[in-house]
Amino acid sequence: MISLANPSRFLSLVDRVVPWLSALVAILLGIGLYMSLFVAPPDYQQGETVKIMFVHVPAAWLGMFGYTLIAIAALGTLIWRHPLADVAAKTAAPIGATFTFIALVTGSLWGKPMWGTYWVWDARLTSMLILLLLYLGLIALWQAIDEPGRAGRAAAILGLVGAINIPIIKFSVDWWNTLHQPASVFRMGGSTIDPSLLTPLFVMAAGFTALFVLLHLIAMRAEILRRRVHALQQTQVERAALAEA
Amino acid sequence: MLDLGTHASFIIAAYGVTFIAVGALVFATLADDRNQRRKLAELERLGIRRRSAKAPPSPTVKTLAKPKTAKAPTKRKSATPRAGKARS
């Protein structure tokens, strides 16, 4: 981890990992989609709409994972001043926001035939919407401040404050009486889902997670390069000013 | 043929939204990465590079650099000392 604090070493690692990770994403998502659409049987209550769960649940997990990553990176920025921490936080926000958006929309599309409504203001749905708003706030904050160091510290504080929403999302179905069903995959006493439905769900979750990591690595590489380009452009401007003087 | 039952439109819409959102994210991420690489390469082509970056071998540098064989001559014992003495 300490050696990866060097951006050049990190870039070299990303260059080597990306082709293998791309292949893994293609394989996992290919198998996952095949199992979800053609192998998984209809649920005894939900019927074929259970297929929506295979994209909704991994997307919701990754929405929460992305924000947890931002909170950890925020600690890296504020406490250890790790040079890649704010790069990791900045680049995780759009990816996490996209997965949270997918979770909200696919959940809504599942809710209409199952609950009879696209939306209810219950604790789980509302806290997920707040998560999306937190992501958008972080993206806006990064866009509003030009200097990356200052933007990183401000975003780190917002990231840490917003992290309180993650346990609220997780335990909202236990703490409040919600229309959203309680935990059915990771729970005390084991999963309540049949293995014929659980297997495609886990394969899709693995594929989505690998995709998240792949996109995050590429986005981090682009951000490091953006900062180098910015620094070089400043050098160019300074040289031109010196030449004129 | 894939049979999605009576709620097929909701399932297709859910997968469609996922494909579009993930596709847009992948496209935007790759485009940004490519764009930054292109900008950096352009700056390096103009000779603007980081202090820590290795400079590519250029003809000017080659001309100015001392060749390995061109070391300063060192004092060597004459192979023919007596001949030297004889001349003096």
Image (tube, coloured by chain):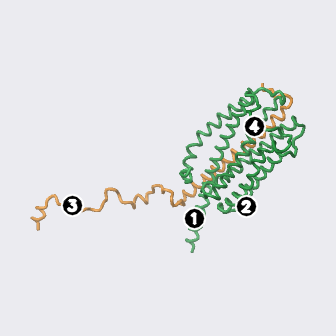
**Residue type pointed to by label 2:** Ala
At label 1, counting other C-alpha atoms closer than 10 Å, the crowd grade (few under 14, some 14-19, many 20 or more) is some
- Select label 3 or label 4 by which is in front: 4
Please give the residue where the numbered disc 2 appears in the rendered image. Answer: A144
User: Residue A141: image x %, image y %?
Assistant: 73, 58
Protein chain holding label 3: B
Chain B rendered in what hue? orange
User: Residue B1: image x %, image y %?
Assistant: 78, 24
Please give the residue where the numbered disc 3 appears in the rendered image. Answer: B76
- Select label 1 or label 2 by which is in front: 2
Circles 1 and 2 in contact, beta carbons < 8 Å:
no
- Select label 1 or label 4 by which is in front: 4
**Residue type pointed to by label 3:** Arg
The tag earlier along the polypeptide, 1 or 2, is 2
Protein chain holding label 1: A
User: Residue A107: image x %, image y %?
Assistant: 81, 40
Asked if residue B15 shows in the view, the reply is: no
| Residue, far left | B86
Chain A rendered in what hue? green
* Residue located at (58% from left, 70% from top): A241
Please give the residue where the numbered disc 4 appears in the rendered image. Answer: A55
| Residue, far bottom | A245
User: Residue A146: image x %, image y %?
Assistant: 68, 62
Measure the C-alpha gap from mark 1 to mark 2. Answer: 23 Å
